[in-house]
Image (cartoon, helix red, strand yellow):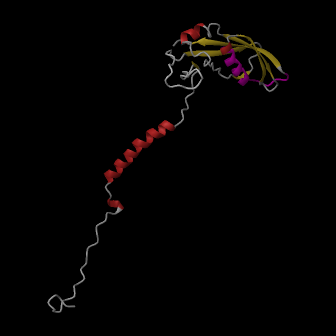
Amino acid sequence: MLDERGNAAERPRDTQVPNPDFESPAQVNKPLIAIGVIMAAVIVLPIFLLIQPSTKPEPATLYSPPTPATSPSGVWNPWAKTSSKPAAIVNYQPRVSWDGPNDMEYFAEPKVDTSSVPNLSSEELKQTVFKDRTVKLRVVINPEGEIDTVETISGHPLLVAAATESAKRSIFRNRSKPTTRILTYTFRVLKD
């Protein structure tokens, strides 16, 4: 090889370039990893808790959901005026008794649905629906201990509906032949 002047040029020597100093996984900044783990926990944990289903049993309460604002044609209208009354909530405790031996194995808790009377306050519900708190039903219990038929004797229609559904899900002990009983449901209003 010749240089610019025509003289023989020396061949360049191979120079060793040092390898770049890449960090090995053991050399990664540990405080940054800790901060990343903490940030992930702060973000993921609340989301997990929000989607976790609740296992708390619901107390027997009377609840009337607010009705959506509708136009005269029955279509939802966000500009229509809604009722200013709060939703009626009445806490109650049901008790059931019956004629004959003590042979009920399972008592289904009655749930009173007041969606048909959304304009009543909780005080008005106590004075009307829960004024006569007793419901009497005549039931026929089959040999397997299940309720076959339910006939209303007395009670407010809303309480009768709740007591009838409860009676249909209640279970008595097995028996040799079908039996007729009078079930009496008493709804005691609890203090708020």
Q: How many marks?
A: 0
What is the quadrant of residue 91 in the picture? Answer: top right
Q: Looking at the image, which residue is at 36% across and 49% down?
A: 36
In the image, residue 48 above or below residue 17: above
**The stretch drawn in magenta includes residue 178:** no
Observer-nearest residue: 69 or 135? 69
What is the quadrant of residue 102 in the picture? Answer: top right
**The stretch drawn in magenta includes residue 163:** yes
Residue 103 in picture, x, y percent from top left: 75, 20
In the image, residue 168 above or below residue 25: above
Identify the residue at the far right of this view.
177
Q: Which residues are magenta?
A: 159-177
Q: Looking at the image, which residue is at 25% across and 75% down?
A: 17
What is the quadrant of residue 46 in the picture? Answer: top left
Location of the N terminus by quadrant is bottom left
Identify the residue at the far left of this view.
5
Residue 78 in picture, x, y percent from top left: 50, 25
Q: Is residue 106 left or right of residue 92?
A: right
Residue 120 in picture, x, y percent from top left: 56, 12
Q: Looking at the image, which residue is at 25% across and 82% down?
A: 14
Residue 101 in picture, x, y percent from top left: 76, 16
